[in-house]
Image (spheres, grey):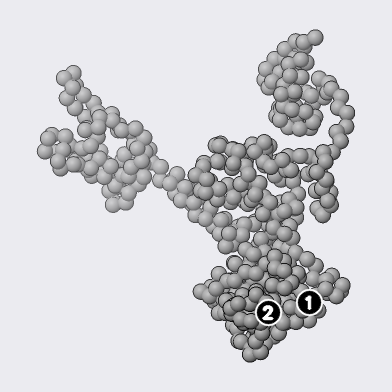
């Protein structure tokens, strides 16, 4: 107490315990002869309290105490032990601050990634947000192109304006022009009233043209005019309308290849490709899988009101080995699937979707991401029974993990256990082997 508080024994003796803050005097109890809450409670166990030092500073401590009583049950004093935990508290604060810094560093507007490729994407998003330049986001399906568009919009001066998204591949060729630019009543069969197009709705904000490579060539000409003149014409109307819109386009296709094939206008491509941002597929940045899994676990814990800690080693190994043709969207769907089957604790490999657990499908996906996958099960080669030496060797390599041994042998974990009993192999390395059963 002398070292922690700065009070000497002589200074502390005969002073009220309230001088240390943590045993404050209660006026109401004092009138009844009880001088602090400790004597009313009788004990205290590892309570987090603060001690006020001689210089006025407070120090966090863990305190335990017992009231001493005589033979008649009267309180005669107390024994208190305290532990200075200021260093621990300081480290906890530093850990919390560092965790926030890491989250901010590895996350940009809900886009998660710690790889060098994603750090570069974050830099490009910031640069794009600070300008009015047309942006073309390229990447495979499920990499998060729309999230990049949202990040650019909500970090730009246009964040107070609307963000209007258009999935060009979801619109038929007859509807895409009307949806983009609008139409007037009577301009075609079924046009019973005026229709405001997406460009007009996005006035003062941003329009996101997803899968822009699917726009028909006839509409590409009008889109080029919008980019150049910043004005649109509704179908059936000859009067141009000015629009103040920032354009962000996205595609999973190779637009240069479509230009060479005559499917996409070259001048429109160059107008869209002013500031390109490329989102790499998940299989090329597997160091991002861990942070993404943690992000989705936290998200679905909150949504499903569960307390799942994460993935166990087997499940995480499968997640890391899989090549994710559906990219981040497929990974999120896999975690959501696991939350349906996993009640608590850690997600097990059996909680993951079947296509991630099936080695034959996984290997074919990794070998060729774009190769078609047959629904028919792959033929299994004939399996011979593993010898005792082979099983022991595998157990040592797998640190006695029976599930991993079963996976390598292509059998179930129960079959591994049964074979170990038959061969007299101990269940752990520190148990003496049992005699083999005939």
Q: Secondary structure at mark 1?
A: helix
Question: In the rendered image, which quarter is residue 113 located in?
Answer: bottom right
* Quadrant in which the C terminus appears: top right
Question: In the rendered image, which quarter is residue 77 located in?
Answer: top left
Front one among 371 and 299: 371
Front one among 151 and 172: 172
Which residue is painted at 79% across and 24% down in the image? 391
Can you see residue 276?
A: no
Note whether 274 is above or below 139 in the view shown.
below
Q: Residue furthest left?
A: 31
- Residue 229: image x %, image y %? 67, 87
- Residue 36: image x %, image y %? 20, 37
Nearer the observer: mark 2 or 1; the answer is 2
Which residue is painted at 57% across and 62% down in the image? 109
Looking at the image, residue 98 sits to the left or right of residue 22; the answer is: right
Mark 2 Cα within 10 Å, few/some/many (few <14, many 20+)?
few
Which residue is painted at 63% across and 77% down in the image? 191
Note whether 109 is above or below 49 in the view shown.
below
**Separation of disc 2 and disc 1 at Cα?**
20 Å
- Residue 376: image x %, image y %? 82, 41
Question: In the rendered image, which quarter is residue 261 located in?
Answer: bottom right
Can you see residue 97?
A: yes
Note whether 257 is above or below 45 in the view shown.
below
Which residue is painted at 61% across and 87% down in the image? 241
Which residue matches tag 2?
188
* Quadrant in which the N terminus appears: top left
Which residue matches tag 1?
217
Mark 1 Cα within 10 Å, few/some/many (few <14, many 20+)?
some
Mark positioned earlier in the residue sequence (2 or 1): 2
- Residue 45: image x %, image y %? 34, 32
Q: Which mark is residue 253?
A: none
Q: Secondary structure at mark 2?
A: loop
């Amino acid at each position: 107490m002398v070292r922690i508080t700065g009070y000497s024994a002589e200074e502390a003796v005969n002073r009220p315990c309230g001088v240390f803050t943590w045993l404050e005097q209660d006026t109401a109890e004092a009138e009844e002869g009880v001088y602090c809450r400790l004597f009313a409670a009788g004990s205290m166990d590892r309570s987090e309290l603060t001690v006020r030092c001689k210089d006025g500073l407070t120090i966090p401590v863990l305190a335990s105490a017992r009231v001493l009583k005589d033979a008649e049950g009267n309180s005669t004093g107390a024994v208190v032990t305290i532990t200075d935990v200021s260093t621990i508290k300081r480290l906890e604060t530093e850990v919390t601050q560092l965790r926030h810094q890491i989250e901010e560093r590895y996350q940009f507007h809900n886009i998660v990634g710690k790889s060098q490729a994603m750090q570069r994407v974050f830099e490009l998003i910031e640069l794009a947000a600070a300008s009015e330049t047309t942006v073309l986001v390229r990447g495979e399906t499920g990499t998060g192109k729309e999230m990049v568009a949202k990040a650019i919009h909500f970090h730009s001066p246009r964040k107070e304006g609307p963000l209007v998204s258009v999935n060009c591949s979801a619109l038929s060729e007859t509807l895409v022009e009307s949806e983009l630019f609008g139409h007037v009543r009577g301009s075609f069969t079924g046009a019973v009233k005026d229709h405001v197009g997406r460009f007009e709705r996005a006035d003062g904000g941003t329009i996101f043209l997803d899968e822009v490579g699917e726009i028909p060539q006839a509409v590409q000409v009008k889109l080029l005019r919008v980019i150049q003149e910043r004005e649109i014409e509704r179908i059936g109307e000859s009067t141009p309308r000015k629009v103040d819109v920032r354009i962000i386009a996205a595609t999973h296709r190779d637009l240069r290849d479509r230009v060479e094939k005559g499917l996409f206008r070259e001048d429109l491509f160059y107008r869209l490709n002013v500031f390109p941002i490329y989102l790499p597929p998940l299989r090329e940045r597997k160091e991002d899988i861990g942070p993404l899994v943690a992000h989705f676990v936290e998200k679905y814990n909150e949504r499903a009101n569960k307390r799942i800690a994460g993935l166990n080693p087997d499940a995480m190994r499968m997640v890391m080995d899989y090549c994710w043709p559906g990219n981040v969207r497929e990974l999120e769907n896999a975690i959501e699937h696991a939350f349906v089957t996993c009640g608590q604790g850690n997600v097990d490999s059996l909680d993951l979707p079947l296509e991630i657990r099936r080695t034959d499908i996984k290997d074919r996906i990794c070998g060729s991401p774009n190769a078609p996958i047959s629904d028919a099960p792959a033929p299994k080669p004939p399996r011979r029974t593993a010898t005792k030496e082979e099983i022991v060797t595998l157990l040592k390599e797998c640190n006695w993990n029976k599930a991993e041994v079963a996976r390598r042998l292509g059998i179930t974990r129960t079959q591994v256990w049964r074979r170990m009993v038959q061969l007299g192999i101990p269940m752990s390395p520190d148990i003496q082997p049992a005699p083999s059963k005939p």
